[in-house]
Image (cartoon, rainbow, N blue to C red):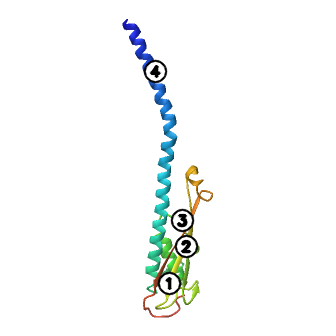
Amino acid sequence: MRERTRNGARRKRASRKGLVVTEMAIILPVMMLLIFGILDFGRLYFTQITLQHAMREGGRFGVTGQQLPDPGNPLALQSRIASIRQVVHDAAVGVGVEPGDIVVSSISGGSDNAGGPGDTLTISMSYSFRFITPMIGQFFNDGEQSFTVSTSFRNEPFPPGDRS
């Protein structure tokens, strides 16, 4: 009698092991998709917030009329637009931003002009974010989400000069 009970208990344990493996095979892909989806949307949010921060930093620097030293020639200064682009690039830590992708313009001077004192300075940039999870990315344009970030500031009164 005891032997029959032991064999029955063994069979129940063996069938439970198979059930656990089956449940895991069903649940694991869903859990992985959920985890990687959370990571992807976290990266997207991080990228957007970082780029907005970088635009604000570039705007704050740009309205003062300052210029950064030229890295190739320490005695010279970069142009004002190159300086603003460098500040934005440096503030966008963790996001692949190239200074050439940043558009600096002003109301009175148009594109590639940071404007003079009292003018409105606008800095903008378009960025394409690539999802790492293909199942999440398929709901967006070829796995990419494009967005534009920009900011506008009024230039402070600074001494006018060659500050384009």
Could you tell me how far apart the alpha carbons at marks 2 and 3 are, in whole angstroms? 12 Å
For marks 4 and 1, the one nearer the N-term is 4
State the residue position of label 2: 125
Q: Nearer the viewer, residue 152 or 139?
A: 139
For mark 3, what is the residue?
96
Viewer-nearest of discs 2 and 3: 2
Residue holding disc 1: 121
Do callouts 4 and 2 mark residues in contact (Cβ within 8 Å)? Answer: no
The answer to whether residue 74 is seen in the rendering is no
Q: Amino acid at mark 1?
A: Leu
The local crowd at label 2, few if under 14, some if 14 to 19, many if 20 or more residues have their Cα within 10 Å, is: some
**Of pointers 3 and 4, the one earlier in the residue sequence:** 4
Cα separation, mark 3 vs mark 4, equals 53 Å
* Tag in front: 3 or 1: 1
Q: Secondary structure at mark 1?
A: strand
In the rendered structure, which disc, 3 or 1, sits on the residue that comes first in sequence? 3
Question: From the viewer's perspective, is residue 113 above or below residue 47?
Answer: below
Instruction: Tell which circle, 4 or 2, labels the residue nearer the N-terminal end.
Output: 4
